[in-house]
Amino acid sequence: MKKRKAVFLDRDGTLVHPKHYPSRPEELQLYAGIGPELRVLQKAGFCLVVITNQAGIARGYFTADDLQRMHEHLTSELAQLDVQLDAIYFCPHHPDGAIPDLAIHCDCRKPQPGMLLRAATDLDLDLRASWFVGDILDDIEAGNRAGCSTILVDLGTEQQPGRQVRCPTFVARTTLHALRIIRAVEQHGSSIELSYRPPSWPLVPAIGVEA
Ligand SMILES: [Mg+2]
Ligand SMILES: [Zn+2]
């Protein structure tokens, strides 16, 4: 059977409004208007998979059970919009964590691609046909390392990337814009050239979408 493709979504700042170490369900607030667009992509055959670093667990700010409650809330909020998440992967680690077992250098904390690789195995995904949407360059690096097309949602926090592996395929103004870029490229192919600029303009080099 043909492998499925996915839209991987970072959580904080991408699916929900950015907050400093949210630990309660009501602190996760979905961006307005993304439900219908997620539904379009889901109907087009994409798995929707959340990929999130949760170093707050290693730091002792909240527990895996707290996170579970938050994610049940997020899942039900999305279900009310007729959007079904296929999976949520989180990394509970941080090298400077306060909880000894979790204070490690792992292979899942973004910019490492571990969570995407695990999802690809679990859900039988074609990573090269998949997309990663995130609001920081660590998301972009993880997506690029996994072989996905990548979209940076510009929240104004990121400097121009210095290394190719951190260059997004596209940059979007909002998550809604990012999801619409995916839809446009899926419908029309890479010939749509959404990121064309005059060659004389100084620019982050585009990585380009696989045809
Ligand atoms: Mg984020
Ligand atoms: Zn980890």
Image (cartoon, rainbow, N blue to C red):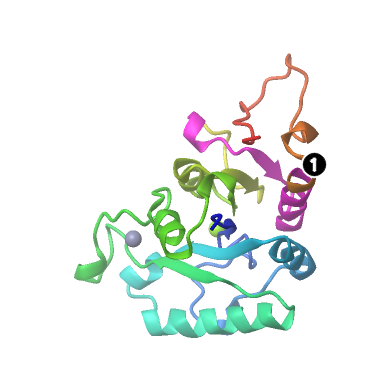
Where's residue 202, x and y in %? 68, 20
Q: Can the viewer see residue 59 in this picture?
A: no
Neighbour class for label 1 at 10 Å: few (<14), some, many (≥20)?
A: few
Question: At x 48% / y 34%, what residue is drawn?
Answer: 165
| 200 part of magenta stretch | no
Q: Which residue is mark 1?
A: 188
Q: Looking at this view, name the residue that lies furthest to the top.
A: 200
Q: Classify mark 1 as within 8 Å of ligand 1 or not, answering yes or no.
A: no
Circle 1 — which element?
helix
Query: Is 169 contained in the magenta span?
Result: yes
Rendering quadrant holding ligand 1:
bottom right
Magenta stretch, main secondary structure class? helix
Which residue is drawn at the image coordinates 73% and 14% (left, top)? 200
In which image quadrant can residue 115 be found?
A: bottom left
Residue 205 coordinates in the image, percent (x, y)? 61, 26
The mark tally for this picture is: 1
Write the start and end of the magenta stretch as one range.
163-185
**Residue 31 in picture, x, y percent from top left:** 71, 67
Which residue is drawn at the image coordinates 63% and 68% (left, top)?
16
208 w.r.t. 128: above or below: above
Q: In which quadrant of the rendered view does residue 81 lie?
A: bottom right
Q: Nearer the viewer, residue 68 or 129?
A: 129
The three-letter amino acid code for the residue at tag 1 is His
Residue 202 or residue 111, whichever sits in front: 111
Q: Is residue 62 left or right of residue 10?
A: left
Q: Is residue 173 above or below residue 98?
A: above
User: Quadrant of the rendered structure where residue 114 is?
Assistant: bottom left
184 left or right, relative to 161: right
Q: Position of residue 22 (x, y in %)?
A: 51, 74
In the rendered image, the quadrant that contains the C terminus is top right
Q: Is residue 119 visible?
A: yes
